[in-house]
Amino acid sequence: MSIDDLLAQILSGLATGSIYASVALALVMIYQATHLVNFAQGELAMFSTYLAWSMIDAGMPYWGAFFATVGISFVAGMLIERVIVRPVENSPVLAVVIVFIGLLVILNSLAGWIFTYTIKTFPSPFPSEPVLGQHYVSAHQLGSTAITLAVLLLLYVFFRFSPLGLAMRAAAQNPASSRLVGIRVGWMLALGWGLAAAVGSIAGMMIAPVVFLDPNMMSGILLYAFAAALVGGIDSPGGAVFGGFLVGVLENLVGAAIGSELKLTVALVLIVGVLVVRPSGLFGKVHVTRV
Amino acid sequence: MNPENRIDSRKLAGIGLLLAFACVLPFHISNYSVFQCTMVLVYAIALLGLNMLTGFNGQISLGHGAFYAIGAYCAAVLMDHYGMPYWATLPVAGAVCLVAGFLFGLPALRLEGLYLALATYALGVCMPQLLKYKGFESWTGGVQGISIIKPDAPFGLPLNPDRWLYFFTLAVALLMFVLGWNLLRGRIGRAMIAIRDQPIAAEAMGVNNAFYKSLTFGVSAMYTGIAGALGAIAVQFVAPDSFSIFLSISLLVGMVVGGLASISGAVFGAIFVQFVPNIASRMSTAAPWAIYGVFLIVFMYVMPGGIAGFIRILAAQATRRFRAVRSRRSA
């Protein structure tokens, strides 16, 4: 492999990595608030992407559909938390995992039912000719990376500097005390779900032009996002973003080295490897259980 | 001890009746229905395996379809490449899955709850890709898969291949259920349940958590692998795409609907998984999965004990009412 190829592989790895980073961040947001991993995160993003597709198909301009989808996903995420996840909030892990898998299956089959299983193309808002006089990355890769980075920055600013962000962090860290100072913890959780769904929908719309739109398009991406979140540390948002980029680059390099047929297995090896060697990930807190 | 695992004479009579029914049934239905009943038995074995791990031992597996696939491919490769008789492939498939499950269970020791769910989910998603891998293609047949021939009845028995396979599967299922029941009611079963409910207390009482957890993983994979081998022989075909993550999810559905931590639940779950999708797919190809999803969520809300748990509640109520009536009469 020449240096040129290597550079191209790394750059396009960073571009897909940005998608993994945002899905991983969505997972981490829900994990931080509820200590649950949302197995339906990928299917939520897939469903949102279908919504965007049908709006564009009906003649809406791209960016109109984009923002409408983000808004709808936000509300839908909140509703799902309130209606479906709420009743099992305090149940054993098994019950919650089963409900998430149920959600995954329902969203997947609904998408197949409504939009059929035939693969659809999804438009990219970015030009198709090369930009900035280079041939390493396409305009779409560059643009989608820029958008995901902007979203990540926005989220950082929101959580770091806004009162609502502070309240959400407080509710996640110490629900009992937060309730005592008047934070509505239940709504904060719902808000977290809404934000996660919105971030996921952006990731879905950014990856759909690359992998094409079909009901199973997110299953591989969700796996990489799991790997990314675990590599970075499942309770560390910054770690999830870093993990996303790392996994994206790794996936591309390994794919170039041993062929792309075993790409998913890379994610499996990463997940099991991280969990066995260093379960807290690179930046996560080490968990200690009181006996 | 789990009250359901106790066997009294009434239960024994019920099981005998059911068995008699299972023996008479295939002579009164079409060959295709016989095949469907064979698949019910196959799923029942697989579900018992999954239930041992998730229901009794509390280790969540979302990727048991992978072990089913390994069992199925073992049977197919051995029959197709080495001309092994179908019945001899079952112990091999079971042994391979026992080792595979034990090995996967070792790292799983360090994973609890969610993390194990994640790792097994990843395993389930990866499996089709691994089976398609070029390096194994001379064995697995790649994307094309392997076709196998349905065995004929031996010793000149007057049974067609479908019925013979049904009775063969019934015998294997019976053996696996008796073994499973024996395992779960004794010392090992108690240790498994103790680890699920109070891992720290179990360890303090001298239960070797690490050993029992990986053992359970291995035995569970073995059950599912044997089911996979039987399923491959019944379907006469294996291909990577029939072992996607959705197979693992249907096993999960069967376990939840049948009843967590229940032996008889495996049979109810298997009947559900085999027949409900058939009925639902008349509506739309997506309908079975939509129904699966709804059942998963609704059962978790209203019937966490599954069908077996529901029957247990009904039986308990009936007994209580019966006793109340009797004591009023005698008074």
Image (spheres, grey):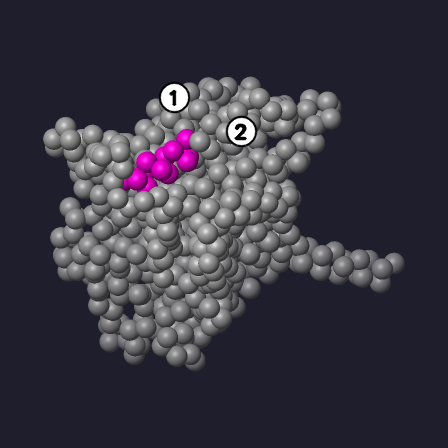
The image quarter containing residue A74 is top right
Viewport quadrant of the C terminus of chain B: bottom right
To the question of a shared chain for discs 1 and 2, the answer is: yes
Q: Residue furthest right?
A: B331
Q: Nearer the viewer, residue A26 or B26?
A: A26
The type of residue carrying mark 1 is Leu
B286 up-or-down from B66: above or below? below
Q: Position of residue B83 (x, y in %)?
A: 15, 60
Residue B101 percent location from the top left of the image: 33, 41
CB atoms of marks 1 and 2 within 8 Å? no
Q: Earlier in the sequence, mark 1 or mark 2?
A: 2
Let me know if residue B34 appears in the view.
yes
Instruction: Give me the residue at 34% from left, 52% from top.
Output: A212
Image label count: 2
Picture quarter containing residue B106? top left
* Residue matched to label 2: A32
Q: Position of residue B297 (x, y in %)?
A: 57, 51
The subunit carrying tag 2 is A
**Few, some or many residues within 10 Å of mark 1 (<14, 14–19, 20+):** some
Q: Which residues are magenta?
A: A138-149
- The local secondary structure at tag 1 comes to loop
Seen from the viewer's position, the closer of residues B230 and B275 is B275
Residue A147 in the magenta stretch? The answer is yes
C-alpha gap between disc 1 and disc 2? 16 Å
Residue A282, label in figure: 1
